Image (cartoon, rainbow, N blue to C red):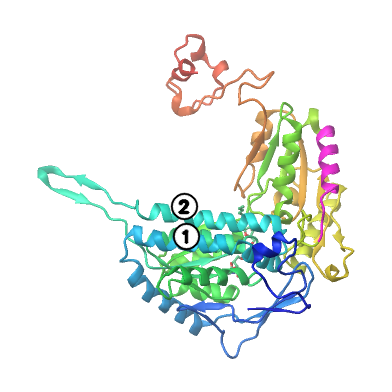
Amino acid sequence: MLRRLASLPLRRPAAALLAAGVRCISSGSVEITLPLNFWAGKRRTGPEKCSKDIVYEPATGRVLCQLEPCGAVEVDQAVKAAKLAFGYWSKMSGMERARVMIEAAHIIESKREEIAEMEVVNNGKSITEARLDVDSARLCIEYYAGLASTLAGQHVQLPGGSFAYTRREPLGVCVGIGAWNYPFQIAAWKSAPALACGNSMVFKPSPVTPVTAVMLAEIYAKAGVPEGLFNVVQGGQETGSLLCQHPDVAKVSFTGSVPTGQKIMEMASKGVKPVTLELGGKSPLLIFKDSDLENAVRGALMANFLSQGQVCSNGTRVFVQKDILPEFVKEVVKRTQAIEIGDPLLESTRMGALVSQPHLDKVLSFVDRAKKEGATVLCGGESYVPSDPKLRGGYYMTPCVLGNCTDDMTCVKEEIFGPVMSVLPFETEDEVLQRANDTSLGLAAGVFTRHRAGERPGDDRVLLPTEDCVCGDGRCRQPLLDHPATASQSCALRQRL
Ligand SMILES: NC(=O)c1ccc[n+]([C@@H]2O[C@H](COP(=O)([O-])OP(=O)(O)OC[C@H]3O[C@@H](n4cnc5c(N)ncnc54)[C@H](O)[C@@H]3O)[C@@H](O)[C@H]2O)c1
Ligand SMILES: CCCCC=O
């Protein structure tokens, strides 16, 4: 699969090379020549006549491989293979399926370094992160393997001695469509639950990162799944649309942006197919003045700069209580400037390359727009050229902290999906909750404080959940200590506190 361009030593097992302090591959040394489609148990070439897409290595900007996008014929072949495999796999017991999945997890463990390296070469993230991605993919498969034998229905007693029962049945051929930021992991997230429940899958990775999903397909095959159980078709939106609209596809599970998610939901609804959508985010991170500053700063860095900021759940709107803003900003900027950017295959690198040139341009244009809208660049936000000549064509930028931000700025409202943190001051808890929740991209949230709500110094309120209030008004949202019921100790929640 891999052809070395540079003259490197003959390949030895990854563990032995690592122990000797030698990398198995280096940035700029890999060319992928084997076909990247996989169905019915084999790698397959795409359509004979198709315009091939070029896949680049983000660290160097070199051509890594050519992608042959699948058309209707290939999609149909993959779905047919999956349908056939479903017939065998769905009849196996959960325990039998689990055994095969656990074997796949073992194989992943044994190939950890190889998979992580290919993820780095294709995606640009640092090797230290890529290894954790592979571990997380393995754990996901182990977790769902564990669930496979616990799937059970219910027994319902009916009048007159009759009864009803329910069974958990697999749906059939499921489609998985993935984004480029966690290519191997997403292929595992999509396939593990589907396969554990007895389904088969046709998976389409992002055309930007097509490489490691095929490795997963080979691993499943080696572990002993029936031929055609997990298939990979390459391509972009046309291939994705063909999959979503295929009449033999029972369900679509998608990870990607909100606009694409909307299209997929629409297509799936026409075939009355269930969909699972994992979409974009613009998550808030709340840092209160009573928090452990060291901890909060580390949290903010992690929530913004992991994977070059290309993480759906990143806490990119960093709300900091005014009293600690100068101290927080000083420390965050100092540490952001110290982040080592460079060759993602080096152990010392903390930030690798963004996934593609167009994506880098898009992220940089968000920084420009932020400046025009009045934000202050406190550090970074520029393209970066590493000193190593082989990395000069790579897609690097300096991680950016934006100050002087307001809630109406584009950098605060839209998902940038790059290493750009927006810092926003706040004064009170009520204010920050309202502002943090004022988004249509509410994927995740983080809070740094040493106190729970109502226990913070100077804050003598305890919020009372509506359903726990016995004052008689179902819409009651009164803070507990202000509540008329509190004085007479008649409030159930108060008694429990
Ligand atoms: N919530 C999560 O778990 C999660 C995880 C990772 C990434 N994401 C999100 O993914 C986005 C970045 O990924 P991206 O740029 O690859 O997203 P994207 O929406 O552009 O593409 C995602 C996938 O959809 C395919 N696609 C595009 N148009 C399609 C169509 N019309 N029909 C069928 N398939 C189509 C693409 O080829 C790709 O495989 C960000 O918004 C990020 O937040 C979310
Ligand atoms: C680590 C999981 C991140 C998912 C979204 O990008």
Against 187, residue 44 (above or below) is below
Q: Which residue is mark 2?
A: 143
Q: Compared to 331, does 267 lie above or below? A: below
User: From the viewer's perspective, is the residue at label 1 or at label 2 nearer?
Assistant: 2
At 45% from the left and 82% from the top, the residue drawn is: 77
User: Ligand 1 quadrant?
Assistant: bottom right
Specify whether residue 151 is painted magenta: no
Going by the image, does 441 lie left or right of 324? left
Q: For the view shown, which residue lies furthest in the right direction?
A: 387
Residue 275 visible within the image: no
**First of labels 1, 2 by sequence position:** 2
Q: Amino acid at mark 2?
A: Tyr
- Tell me how far mark 1 sits from mark 2, CA to CA: 8 Å
| Part of the protein shown in magenta | 326-342
Given the image, on which type of amino acid does mark 1 rest? Ala
Total marks in image: 2
Image quadrant in which the N terminus is located: bottom right
Dot 1, how many residues are within 10 Å of its Cα: few (below 14), some (14-19), or many (20+)? Answer: many
Q: Residue 432: x, y in percent?
A: 68, 34
User: Disc number at residue 261?
Assistant: none
Overall secondary structure of the magenta section: helix
Asked whether 479 or 123 is in front, the reply is 123
Say if the magenta span includes residue 327: yes
**Dot 1 corresponds to which residue?**
192
Answer yes or no: do the residues labelled 1 and 2 have beta carbons within 8 Å? yes
